[in-house]
Image (cartoon, rainbow, N blue to C red):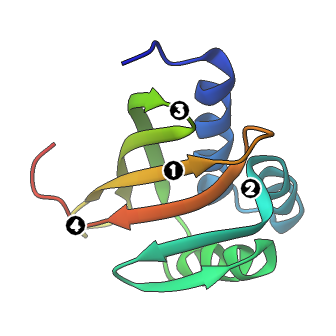
Amino acid sequence: MSAVRAKTRKLLKNHMESWNVGDPVKRRRLVEITSSPRAHVSSPYGEHSGILAQLESIAEVRKAFPKLRSRGKILGEHHGWVLVSWTTKFGGKRQPLRGIDVLQLDRKGRIARIVSFSPVSSL
Protein backbone atom coordinates (compact mmCIF):
# COMPACT_ATOMS: atom_id res chain seq x y z
CA MET A 1 0.00 0.00 0.00
CA SER A 2 1.42 3.36 -0.97
CA ALA A 3 1.89 6.20 1.43
CA VAL A 4 -0.99 8.62 1.65
CA ARG A 5 -0.27 11.67 -0.46
CA ALA A 6 -0.48 15.17 1.01
CA LYS A 7 -2.98 16.06 -1.74
CA THR A 8 -5.31 13.27 -0.57
CA ARG A 9 -5.01 14.33 3.08
CA LYS A 10 -6.01 17.87 2.05
CA LEU A 11 -8.89 16.50 0.00
CA LEU A 12 -10.23 14.58 3.00
CA LYS A 13 -9.77 17.57 5.31
CA ASN A 14 -11.80 19.76 2.96
CA HIS A 15 -14.43 17.06 2.41
CA MET A 16 -14.96 16.62 6.15
CA GLU A 17 -15.07 20.38 6.63
CA SER A 18 -17.90 20.57 4.08
CA TRP A 19 -19.97 18.64 6.62
CA ASN A 20 -18.82 20.79 9.55
CA VAL A 21 -19.25 24.29 8.16
CA GLY A 22 -22.55 26.05 8.77
CA ASP A 23 -22.16 28.67 6.04
CA PRO A 24 -23.75 27.36 2.81
CA VAL A 25 -21.47 29.50 0.60
CA LYS A 26 -18.32 28.06 2.21
CA ARG A 27 -19.84 24.57 2.07
CA ARG A 28 -20.52 24.89 -1.65
CA ARG A 29 -16.95 26.05 -2.29
CA LEU A 30 -15.60 23.06 -0.37
CA VAL A 31 -17.83 20.57 -2.18
CA GLU A 32 -16.91 22.06 -5.57
CA ILE A 33 -13.17 21.72 -4.93
CA THR A 34 -13.40 18.19 -3.50
CA SER A 35 -16.01 16.54 -5.75
CA SER A 36 -16.33 16.01 -9.47
CA PRO A 37 -19.47 17.63 -10.95
CA ARG A 38 -21.25 14.26 -11.27
CA ALA A 39 -19.94 12.68 -8.07
CA HIS A 40 -22.14 9.79 -6.93
CA VAL A 41 -22.77 8.98 -3.26
CA SER A 42 -24.21 5.68 -2.09
CA SER A 43 -24.92 5.14 1.61
CA PRO A 44 -27.40 3.20 3.75
CA TYR A 45 -29.42 6.43 3.88
CA GLY A 46 -29.81 6.85 0.12
CA GLU A 47 -28.06 7.64 -3.14
CA HIS A 48 -27.54 10.85 -5.05
CA SER A 49 -25.44 12.24 -7.86
CA GLY A 50 -24.05 15.69 -8.53
CA ILE A 51 -22.86 18.59 -6.46
CA LEU A 52 -26.31 20.11 -5.94
CA ALA A 53 -27.69 16.84 -4.57
CA GLN A 54 -24.67 16.50 -2.31
CA LEU A 55 -25.18 20.04 -0.99
CA GLU A 56 -28.88 19.35 -0.37
CA SER A 57 -28.05 16.16 1.52
CA ILE A 58 -25.51 17.88 3.77
CA ALA A 59 -27.88 20.80 4.39
CA GLU A 60 -30.67 18.42 5.47
CA VAL A 61 -28.40 16.70 7.97
CA ARG A 62 -27.03 20.00 9.28
CA LYS A 63 -30.56 21.36 9.69
CA ALA A 64 -31.44 18.37 11.89
CA PHE A 65 -28.10 18.51 13.74
CA PRO A 66 -26.67 22.06 13.71
CA LYS A 67 -23.85 21.13 16.13
CA LEU A 68 -22.67 18.26 13.92
CA ARG A 69 -18.91 17.69 13.74
CA SER A 70 -17.29 15.06 11.53
CA ARG A 71 -13.71 13.96 11.32
CA GLY A 72 -12.04 11.37 9.16
CA LYS A 73 -8.86 9.38 8.87
CA ILE A 74 -7.36 7.85 5.76
CA LEU A 75 -6.76 4.14 6.29
CA GLY A 76 -5.23 3.50 2.89
CA GLU A 77 -4.86 4.77 -0.65
CA HIS A 78 -3.91 3.17 -3.95
CA HIS A 79 -4.65 3.52 -7.67
CA GLY A 80 -7.27 6.24 -7.26
CA TRP A 81 -9.08 4.58 -4.33
CA VAL A 82 -9.10 5.87 -0.76
CA LEU A 83 -10.35 4.04 2.34
CA VAL A 84 -11.56 6.39 5.09
CA SER A 85 -12.84 5.84 8.62
CA TRP A 86 -14.96 8.62 10.06
CA THR A 87 -16.84 9.68 13.17
CA THR A 88 -19.71 12.14 13.33
CA LYS A 89 -20.70 13.72 16.62
CA PHE A 90 -24.15 15.30 16.69
CA GLY A 91 -24.00 17.25 19.95
CA GLY A 92 -26.24 16.53 22.88
CA LYS A 93 -26.83 13.01 24.14
CA ARG A 94 -26.94 11.22 20.78
CA GLN A 95 -24.16 8.66 20.37
CA PRO A 96 -21.53 9.34 17.69
CA LEU A 97 -21.94 7.61 14.34
CA ARG A 98 -18.93 5.77 12.96
CA GLY A 99 -18.45 4.55 9.44
CA ILE A 100 -16.15 3.63 6.62
CA ASP A 101 -16.16 5.22 3.17
CA VAL A 102 -14.55 4.03 -0.01
CA LEU A 103 -13.72 6.98 -2.25
CA GLN A 104 -12.94 6.72 -5.93
CA LEU A 105 -10.98 9.70 -7.23
CA ASP A 106 -11.17 11.10 -10.74
CA ARG A 107 -8.12 11.98 -12.84
CA LYS A 108 -7.99 15.43 -11.23
CA GLY A 109 -7.88 13.93 -7.74
CA ARG A 110 -11.47 14.87 -6.88
CA ILE A 111 -14.07 12.54 -5.42
CA ALA A 112 -15.96 10.78 -8.21
CA ARG A 113 -17.75 8.22 -6.05
CA ILE A 114 -18.35 7.57 -2.36
CA VAL A 115 -19.61 4.24 -1.08
CA SER A 116 -20.38 4.68 2.61
CA PHE A 117 -20.91 2.01 5.23
CA SER A 118 -22.41 2.99 8.57
CA PRO A 119 -22.97 2.45 11.34
CA VAL A 120 -19.80 0.49 12.04
CA SER A 121 -19.55 -0.71 15.61
CA SER A 122 -15.77 -0.98 15.89
CA LEU A 123 -12.95 0.58 13.96
Q: Marks 2 and 1, how far apart in space? A: 10 Å
Labelled disc at residue 79 = 3
CB under 8 Å between callouts 4 and 1? no
Q: For residue 41, which quarter of the picture?
A: bottom right
For the question of whether residue 111 can be seen, the reply is yes
Amino acid at pointer 4: Pro
Judged by depth in the image, the label closer to the viewer, 2 or 4, is: 2
Secondary structure beneath dot 3 equals: loop
Please tell me whether mark 3 or mark 1 is closer to you in this view. Answer: 3
Q: Looking at the image, is mark 2 or mark 4 earlier in the sequence?
A: 2
- C-alpha span from label 4 to label 3: 26 Å
Find out whether the residues at labels 3 and 2 contact each other: C-beta distance under 8 Å: no
Amino acid type of the residue that numbered disc 2 sits on in the rendered structure: Ser
Compared to residue 4, the image places residue 113 above or below, namely below
Quick one: label 3 or label 2, which is nearer the N terminus?
A: 2
Q: Which residue is label 1 attached to?
A: 103
Disc 2 crowd rating (10 Å Cα; few below 14, some 14-19, many 20+) is many
Q: Residue at x 78, y 71 (%)?
A: 51
Please tell me how crowded label 4 is: few (under 14), some (14-19), or many (20+) other residues with Cα within 10 Å: few
The label nearer to you, 4 versus 1, is: 1
Per the model, the C-alpha gap separating discs 2 and 4 is 23 Å
Residue farthest to the front, as pictured:
79
Is disc 1 placed on a helix, strand or loop? strand
Please state if 47 lies on the left or on the right of 32 as rendered: left
Q: Kindly report the distance in space between the C-alpha atoms of the residues bearing marks 4 and 1.
A: 17 Å
Q: What label does residue 35 carry, if any?
A: 2
Q: For the residue carrying disc 3, how many other residues have a C-alpha within 10 Å: few (<14), some (14-19), or many (20+)?
A: few
Marks 3 and 2, how far apart at CA: 17 Å
Residue 47 placed where, x, y %?
Answer: 52, 84
The image quadrant of residue 14 is: top right
